[in-house]
Amino acid sequence: MNRRTLLKLAAGSPALSPWAQAQVARATRGMPPPKIRDIKAISTAPGKIPLAVVKVVTDQDGLYGWGCASFTLRSQVVVAAVEKYLKPLLVGKPADRIDDIWQATYNSSYWRNGPVLNNAISGVDQALWDIKGRQAGMPVYQLLGGKCREAVACYSHASGGEIQEAIDHARRIIANGFRYVRVQVGVPGMEGYGGAGRGSLAAKPLHASPVYEPAYYIRRTLKLFEECREQLGDEIELLHDVHERVSPNQAVQFAKDLERFKLFFMEDALAPEDISYFRQIRRECATPIAMGELFNSPHEWTPLITERLIDYMRMHVSQMGGVTPARKVAAMGEIYNVKTAWHGPGDVSPIGHAANVTLDLACHNFGIQEYFAFDQTTREVFQGTLVAKDGYLYANETPGWGIEVDEKAAAKLFREELKPDGMPYYGFPVIRRLDGTVIKP
């Protein structure tokens, strides 16, 4: 068998079993380490959600890797960062020096810890881990030390405009094998997170934008949890996302009021700008707290972990720079008994979800994993997309992430889903209080 054939097989031919691929990989280990030949960012838009993924191609035929760079709200800025800045920096560099490349790219812009740079770095970083797994003939979790558990417990999302509608949705999720359910309900006449409320507001807003009033939402949510415990019982683990939409003082009181319902966790009770208030929440009650979805910088998560002010770290892995920093922060969290609960909605690509599950399997302090059920179109573009079975996710056992991307289909989906303007503005809607004050999303 010639060198080119060996390298193609080592990159993960689906015709070979994982064991056979591992044997081929061993046969190629005496070859020179691969170098980065090309880097490209690929845009797609499953379900009209703009995503960016990165492909790193090496100088060894057939050896490449995929990474997630999913800053959905500014995806095309990430594409530019990858192609105009990281690619010229990294082409020709050894592809096997993952941590060294991460440090070089992290410092290359001098100003750092921003979402655009971090997601661009993540795309490259995750692609290099994929390459490493393909070289070794192993799934990436094996390179991080192997499994700490057989599978990854997940939670799914239940919501509704009315309380009973949200509970009925939760029942359907439970019937599919999930024991952990995030529940949200709408407020009549308001643009609530996780469910729009039916009916009209008693008070008239002074503007035409979507309306949201924190006090209305809090009272409505407390009624939701009373009914959830009454109808669903105590054996189902309930979660809730505040989404930063209340004042710090309201967050403290809300966490105290939710304590009697024994939540699995209360998520994003505070905005990143207000995280010092977590000390007050911790003093006042024992409601488990999850935080981190909007974090970009170690300056945000480090004090919450080291002071044990949260129970679950909930960062968006590409937003913090990829698998390389995420596994280090997870290890730090293990020392302080803070568990992982990586962000995993539809604006994380299937590659990013595979990276989440890899960390979940390999880190002892795993807590829970957010699950998003991708549609058939997405699964056709991202071949190997993970699908939950009875409330659990299992990693692909093929080398790397076990995911291949149909590049032509991905590009076509981006063009078709985002017609007629190509790439329209995509961002969180502006939501206001009754008097017109803009609130955090």
Image: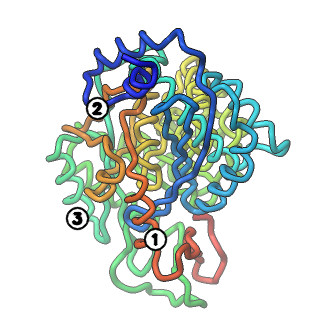
**Place of residue 1 in the rendered image (x, y in percent of width and height, measured from the top left):** 36, 16
**Mark 2 residue element:** loop
Judge by depth and name the residue closer to the eye, 428 or 101: 101
> What is the number of the mark on residue 426?
none
Q: Residue 316 in the image: state x and y as whole percent.
A: 54, 44
Q: Amino acid at mark 3?
A: Gln
Q: Give the labeled residue for mark 3.
A: 164
Q: Secondary structure at mark 3?
A: helix
Q: Please give left or right for residue 406 compared with residue 420 in the image.
A: left
- Say which amino acid is labelled 1: Arg
**Residue furthest left as drawn:** 175
Graded by Cα atoms within 10 Å as few (under 14), some (14 to 19) or many (20 or more), the crowding at tag 2 reads few
Q: Position of residue 289 (x, y in %)?
A: 51, 40
Q: Tell me the number on the disc at residue 14.
A: 2
Where does residue 235 sit, x and y in percent of width and height? 23, 37
Name the element at disc 1. helix
Tell me which colouring the rendered structure shows: rainbow
Instruction: Give above or below for 95 relative to 382.
Output: above
Label 1, residues with CA under 10 Å away: few <14, some 14-19, many ≥20? some
Q: Give the amino acid at mark 2.
A: Pro
